[in-house]
Image (cartoon, helix red, strand yellow):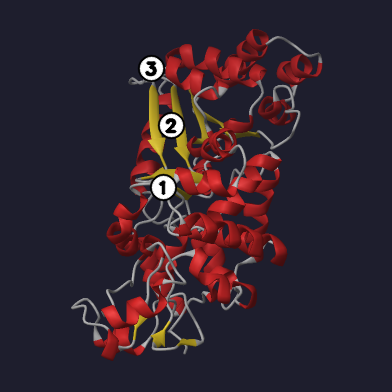
Amino acid sequence: MDAGPARCQGEVVAELLERASHLSTLREALAAGRAGRGTLVLLAGEAGAGKTTLLRHFCGAGETLWGSCDPLYTPRPLGPFLDIAQQTGGELRELVAAGAKPHQVAAAVVRAAGEKRGTTIVLDDLHWADEATLDVLSLLGRRIATIPALVVASYRDDELGRSHPLRQLLGELRSGPSIRRLTAPPLSPEGVAALAAPHGIDADALYRATGGNPFFVTEVIAAPGAPIPLTVRDAVLARAARMTEAATAVLEAVSITLPYAEPWLLDALVTGAEAALEQCLSAGVLQAVPGGVAFRHDLARMAIEESLSPHRRIALHGRALRALAAPPAGAADCAAPRATAAGNCFRCSDHSASRHSSQFSPTNRLALCASPRNCHSSQLTATDAAAPPFGWRNVPPWPTGRFAAATGTCAIRMKSSMPFGYAMSFGPPRM
């Protein structure tokens, strides 16, 4: 999601949204490097946050040496410095080709930077770095104040578990005048609205589905009308494919339990879920939320759910229904918060609720939007009564009203025939 070229000097990149402060910090650091005072900038952000795009935008300001790490099962030794050595030639290329030690490579990088003050050295995607690369970065970081260059190291902070080697290095590099830390956050609702407006896309819906992730936002806009953009689907599934079979099973289970999966429910769906869940969290695909775990982005959840085979989907829903029919003590206490978290869930009349309670229990996994005559909640507005909640399109009517399920367990009637998880489309609602 953050792929970039080996060298980007002179590229013209469109103006970025909500990254002015990041560019200002990088320009200040570059000016310091030209004055002989080096700076190491540690740029963090989730996958698709636009770290590489930010650096492409910035790096045209001067001489840039760009090296990237790759998602290989066996990382290239000194991967980004192999890229940089191809650009510099000379001593650095000879050392890297000869399999030099990290301290020798670091010394050669320092000498190369000293030949031209104000050089920017980009080390991209360091979450995939090998240990030798991290050793070189450690040596550079500890001596950065004396190096007349700007070194920028980007990485996905959502993929760094507690024991990740890069996590340990980050803890050892103390922030100060010569070591700066930046984070590329998701776009705000206002930022998403600014991108969506020229295309007539429902900005609120786009933000809810993408969480403001710049990659997801731009890909959805670039593929109008597509259930899930192919680039998004491929990126999500490729990320899942690098995980263990047990971790993939956890992702599949969480994809059908909305708005999140409680630990007890996950244990009922996946054998040995606890151990596999740790990998899902460390990889940044899932995140801890109050009461359980959920996908970091609903668009990613939909991509995983859509990839389920029909029999796998039915099996998961069946297990979920059996587990929810007999929840552990205390599980039902979260009924109101769960319904509220699901969104567009309204309290129905006793008559309407009792009619279906035997089929969909416990109530903390069900949300029925009854017709206006059966609903006495003050939250139900005229708009809500006239149209189903966003995301549910062409749902067959329930006996006394429209069925608006907030959870995957209630969606078993429609999942197989509805693309995009729950038939989501961006734009004006269609009935």
The image position of residue 292, as x and y in percent, is 42, 45
Q: Marks 2 and 1, how far apart in space?
A: 58 Å
Amino acid carrying label 3: it is Arg
In the orientation shown, which residue stands out farthest toward the left?
378
Q: Which residue is mark 1?
A: 328
Give the Cα separation between the discs numbered 3 and 2.
20 Å
Specify whether 22 is left or right of 236.
Answer: left
| Residue with the mark numbered 3 | 174
Q: Position of residue 45 (x, y in %)?
A: 46, 41
**Mark with earlier residue (1, 3):** 3
Helix, strand or loop under label 3? loop
Q: State the residue at coordinates (60%, 45%).
A: 270
Check whether the beta carbons of the residues at disc 3 and disc 2 lie within 8 A of each other: no
| Amino acid under disc 1 | Pro
Which tag is nearer the camera, tag 2 or tag 1? Answer: 1
The residue that mark 2 highlights is: 30
